[in-house]
């Protein structure tokens, strides 16, 4: 079966979430030589020996279930670590945005400010380094998004105030 497909296709098939396909791949990889390849310690492992009455194929199936459980636990662990990292990075970006708001309140940053003119001031702040660790351009991109959003809000507010001013003059 494996000779009919490329090794890449075979490995993709083995990483499938379908338990049948995982067991199929496991059985292809570990055929009859599986038990003979085990040492005495592994053969006596309680997870591998369920009953002396079990056939070799039943033991392989039982053990492959155990391996699949281990893989799923490892995948879950990686997912939790990845999610925790994402949450931490989001918190760092939020702290950086909050610092940009503080700079805006102080007048250091205005809607027409360019990154190069304030980069040194922002880079000296402690919240800059964790965001920089996420990517070289991430602080600048967040800054540009902040300024662009603020500039757009400014233009909308200015338009609204102008309309209100004009309507109040007519009355």
Image (cartoon, rainbow, N blue to C red):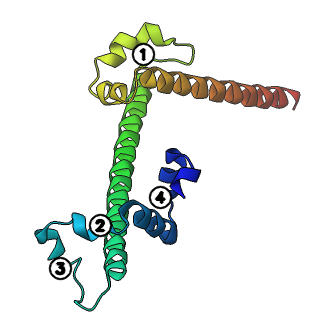
The residue at the point 22 percent across, 81 percent down is 49
Which residue corresponds to mark 2? 34
Q: Position of residue 15 (x, y in %)?
A: 47, 57
Q: Nearer the viewer, mark 1 or mark 4?
A: 4
Which residue corresponds to mark 3? 46
Gap in angstroms between the C-alphas marked 3 and 4: 26 Å
Pick whichever of labels 3 and 1 is earlier in the sequence.
3
Give the secondary structure at mark 4. Answer: helix
Which residue appears farthest toward the bottom when viewing the image? 53
Q: Quick check: marks 3 and 1 in contact, CB under 8 Å?
A: no
Gap in angstroms between the C-alphas marked 2 and 1: 69 Å
Which residue corresponds to mark 4? 14
Height in image: 69 above or below 135? below
Pick whichever of labels 4 and 2 is earlier in the sequence.
4
Which residue corresponds to mark 1? 108
Pick whichever of labels 3 and 4 is earlier in the sequence.
4
> In this view of the protein, which residue sits in the foreground, 43 or 113?
43
Height in image: 88 above or below 53? above
Pick whichever of labels 2 and 1 is earlier in the sequence.
2
Gap in angstroms between the C-alphas marked 3 and 1: 67 Å
């Amino acid at each position: 079966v494996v000779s009919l497909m490329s090794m890449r296709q075979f490995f993709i098939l083995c990483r499938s979430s379908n338990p049948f396909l995982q067991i199929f791949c496991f059985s292809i990889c570990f055929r009859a030589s599986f038990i003979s390849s085990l040492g005495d310690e592994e053969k006596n492992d309680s997870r591998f020996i369920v009953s002396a009455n079990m056939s070799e194929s039943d033991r392989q199936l039982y053990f492959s279930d155990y391996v699949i459980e281990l893989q799923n636990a490892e995948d879950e662990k990686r997912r939790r670590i990845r999610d925790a990292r994402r949450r931490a990075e989001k918190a760092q970006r939020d702290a950086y945005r909050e610092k940009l708001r503080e700079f805006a309140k102080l007048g250091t940053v205005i809607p027409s400010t360019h990154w190069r003119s304030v980069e040194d001031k922002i880079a000296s702040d402690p919240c800059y380094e964790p965001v920089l660790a996420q990517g070289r351009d991430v602080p600048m991109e967040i800054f540009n998004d902040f300024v662009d959003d603020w500039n757009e809000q400014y233009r909308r507010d200015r338009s609204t105030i102008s309309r209100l001013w004009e309507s109040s003059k007519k009355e």
